[in-house]
Image: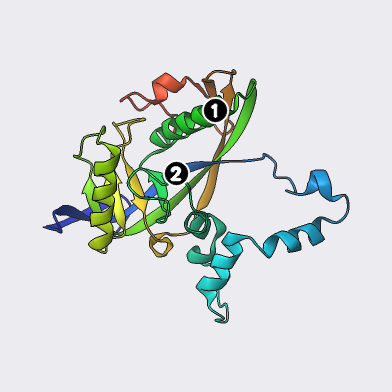
Amino acid sequence: MSDNTWTRSVAAEDHQIVDVDQTFFTLIPSRFPTIDVFARVANDRSGELAELESLTNPRLRERDRLLSGAQVVDGNGPLLQNWNHAPFAYHNPEGSRFFEAEHPVLDLASDMQTALAISIRKRETFLSSTGEAAIGLEMRELSRTVRGRFADGRSWAVDIARGDRLQLGRSILEAGLDGLLYRPPERPAGFCICVLRGDVLDRAVQRDHFKFVWNGSKVSKVYSFGSGAEYHPDDLRGEDQILAA
């Protein structure tokens, strides 16, 4: 199947099921251009520090588990790509929208406007909690294709209580599905996919870079390095598609 193709089947385990083959989007914090993570403290010993860090790095331990001692034929395979297996190696102590912390997931958006609306709200929540002064945040756009069987929760209410959401998540795990689709409260006009395992992911592709302008209380503007366009966060959260192609 090609991108944006959905094949519906008979509901199972009280869920409407869809076979997904579509490209989804997310944003991650970035340095543009990239920098050495140990540059500020390493002097000329960055390699030694990186080697020490790798001994306790959960992402690298998960990579070793995936390899299970096998000879690597394609070290660039989607499952071994950092952006694809790291979300399942690092547990979020707060859990995710539909799952407890012991079930790490990857949440992606159906379009970049929805991905931006979600990312802005997350950055605002974090920066408000730390009392961060005005700053510009650079964010990197990633896209990747997802292929698998998912529960279709796009008709569910956006304001489902936390306990009920977790119960839905448990039922999806019990049904053996690859995750679910849902409407995010940050932009209900779009939808998201919650992925439970990395083997349904194609390779992540880097795309545009954005700058979030944090004024000390909220993200006031968003700039696209690729198109040169400027956006207001409230417009990105609306129903109209305003993102430049």
Q: Earlier in the sequence, mark 2 or mark 1?
A: 2
Q: What colour scheme has been applied to the protein in the rendered image? A: rainbow
Under mark 2, the amino acid is Glu
Locate residue 149: give its quadrant: bottom left
Return the residue nearer the eye: 233 or 88: 88
Amino acid bearing label 1: Ser
Residue 63 in the image: state x and y as whole percent: 56, 67
Horizontal and vertical percent position of residue 74: 55, 73
> Can you see residue 19?
no
Horizontal side of residue 59 vs 54, given as left or right: left
Q: Nearer the viewer, residue 179 or 56?
A: 56
Q: Quadrant of the C terminus?
A: top left
Residue projecting furthest to the right: 44
Which residue lies under the disc numbered 2? 94
Secondary structure type for disc 2: loop
> 178 left or right of 72?
left
- Structural crowding at the residue carrying mark 1, measured as other residues with C-alpha within 10 Å and reported as few (<14), some (14–19) or many (≥20): few
The residue lying at 40 percent from left, 20 percent from top is 235
Q: Which residue in the protein does label 1 denote?
A: 129
Report x, y in % for residue 207. Answer: 53, 44
